[in-house]
Amino acid sequence: MAAWVKADETGIDMTLMSELGATVGELFFRDGAVSFSSPLFPRAIGGEHIIADFQLSFYNAAALASALEAGGLTFEEAGTARRVFEGGTLIVEIERSRTVVRLVNHLRGYSLTLEGDFERDFE
């Protein structure tokens, strides 16, 4: 599905759209609180998971490493790859390029592919 995303220091706003451009979900993240509404996503897929995937894929590596370490997780970045470990177990792996981000969440058993113009993230 297509998504319009605005992410900056104040938070994250996402509007999820069908192939025809109809809104099928909205997600907002401000001051540590997530608001997510969508008739298409099961309740088990909360907005928190979407926000976490977005942050793991795009946020500053040093900030992620610090935040995850505080939660008992290890974050590694090598070239275009990012990985999150719990103990010695790989729980999330991400491969990034200028046009595609592929994320595999081994802990929760899903994967996703994001396509877009991520050129700015590699400058």
Image (spheres, grey):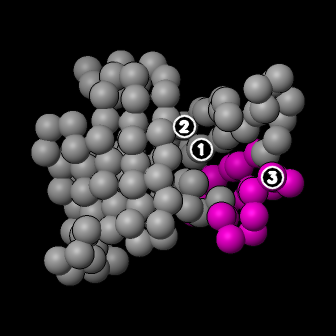
* Residue occupying image coordinates x 22% and y 44%: 81
Secondary structure beneath disc 3? loop
Quickly name the residue at label 3.
Answer: 40
Residue 79 position, x and y percent, is 14, 38
Residue mark closest to the camera, 2 vs 3: 3
| Residue at mark 2 | 7
Please name the residue that numbered disc 1 is placed on. Answer: 12
Which image quarter is the N terminus in?
top right
Residue 4 percent location from the top left of the image: 66, 29
Tell whether 8 sits left or right of 102.
right
Residue 34 among magenta residues: yes
Label 2 residue SS? strand
Earlier in the chain: of badge 2 and badge 1, it is: 2
Dividing the picture into quarters, in which one does residue 20 lie? Answer: top right
Q: For the residue carrying disc 1, how many other residues have a C-alpha within 10 Å: few (<14), some (14-19), or many (20+)?
A: some
* For residue 82, side relative to residue 113 (left or right): left
- The picture places residue 12, in percent across and down from the top left corner, at 59, 44
Residue occupying image coordinates x 67% and y 30%: 2
User: Mark 3 packing: few (<14 Cα in 10 Å), some, or many (20+)?
Assistant: few
Magenta residues (range): 26-46
Query: Residue 72 occupies which quadrant of the picture?
Result: bottom left
Q: Is residue 9 above or below residue 88?
A: above
5 and 19: which is toward the camera: 19
